[in-house]
Image (tube, rainbow, N blue to C red):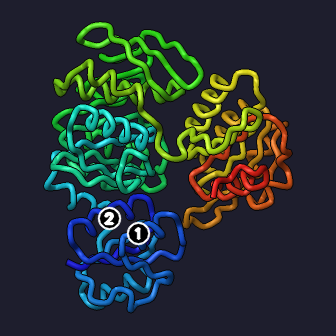
Amino acid sequence: MKIHFLGIGGIGMSAQAIHEHLSENVVTGTDPYSSERVKYLKNLGIKVFEKHLPQNVDDAQLVVRTPAVPKENPEVKSAEERKIPVITRLEHHIQILREYERFGITGTDGKTTTTSMLAHVLLKLGKDPTVFLGSTHPLLEHGNYRKGGNLCVFEMDESQPGFENYFPDFLIITNIRGDHIENFKSYDDYINSFKKSCKNARLCISYADENILSNTITFGLNEGIYHLVSIEKKMYNQFATISTPYGIKKFKLSVPGIHNALNALSVIALTFELGLDQEKVLKAFEDYVLPGRRFQISYDDGQITIIDDYSHTPVEIESLLKTAREVFEDREINIIFQPHRYSRLKREWKEFAKSLKIADKIYITEVYGAFERKDEVSAKNIAELIDNAVFVENKDAILDYLKIKPGVYIFAGAGDIIDASQSFRRKIGGLKV
């Protein structure tokens, strides 16, 4: 079968394209951005076009498009005129997964980390999971994808209606907050999608502290069938004591942040409920590493530390900065934040201001639109609420404001703020080529 992907360089799309390529289908795609994933796909032998042109579809038998590609796209129109089926990334992903035993992870925050944790634990226990990840991870042969057996660990992207149609066998819902609600009919419709997802699963693990879902196995900070009793933190390591139906247990987690301890707890809840070897599960977390751009230390010479992070919601920014405070107790924390999507900024700009105030110095760039149109809102609105914040409209000008002196520099956001981080590393001579 020949499959053509529109927006093939996206983290989710590229994983699905790799899956189809390794399944001996003919894969092509179009993406105007020469990202790391696009380069990787080309190295695999997948043909990627740089411009959206009708002829790119050629003799494809199926076209898959990301939500960022509008129905007016010339390739979409070409496919429709020639009666070639056009489906969304989500619909294609659901089709792929039908043949697997499905381990789904969804929720507003922590999906990617929790997915990688579950994959890590299953591999440690001798399983052979196929994995679709919303980032890259050294655990996976292709970064965001691993071809394994008939057990599949994957993220369920909750940003678009229809994610309730995955029908996972086993499901973890990390948390539920009102993000991406502009894509749904209402907030209630958004919540109901999670409730339907939970009902569609044979076993559902949910976050107890929110008290949104019922009839699930729960985990939580203070509440839940599985919950944290205490946690001791030492630099990048955490030593957690947890309460479970099988008694009090302890485990070491090799990454910082209470949110990551909760992510691990959700995986523990699922694997314990499935009857997997409890001691091996707990032991597996000792050498776990985070996915790319999740508290990723990209440079550290003892004086200057640079961290790249994907956090792009107020809660994620708060968790990120609190974690930095715990790990780097006596050092100055600088955050360079690029808001992601105008719709999110318009809805939560005041919440962003509250979260960012945890840092010592705040630099805010203009919004990364992610294909959204500018909606009479600017990231400058956030900066105006914070006394020690600087608004830098163009992210490429950020180096004019950052002084090279001891401290922690966090480049945060789901857009292309990583470019500014790389430029800063070049400036201090720390970029490894």
Whole-percent x and y of residue 49? Answer: 45, 82
Whole-percent x and y of residue 90? Answer: 32, 60
Q: Quadrant of residue 15?
A: bottom left
Q: Amino acid at mark 1?
A: Leu
* Quadrant housing the C terminus: bottom right
Whole-percent x and y of residue 268? Answer: 31, 25
Q: Residues within 10 Å of mark 1 (few under 14, many from 20)?
A: many
* Above or below, comparing residue 142 to residue 169 in the picture: below
Q: Are marks 1 and 2 in contact (CB under 8 Å)?
A: yes
Q: Secondary structure at mark 2?
A: helix
* Quadrant housing the N terminus: bottom left
Whole-percent x and y of residue 294? Answer: 53, 41
* Above or below, comparing residue 126 to residue 5 in the picture: above
Q: Secondary structure at mark 1?
A: helix
Q: Residue at x 47, y 38 (%)?
A: 290
* Above or below, comparing residue 45 to residue 291 in the picture: below
The residue labelled by disc 2 is 18
* Above or below, comparing residue 179 to residue 184 in the picture: above
Mark toward the start of the polypeptide (1 vs 2)? 2
Of residues 171 and 181, the one nearer the viewer is: 171
Q: Residue at x 66, y 58 (%)?
A: 419
The residue labelled by disc 1 is 41
Whether residue 200 is visible: no
Q: Residues within 10 Å of mark 2 (few under 14, many from 20)?
A: many
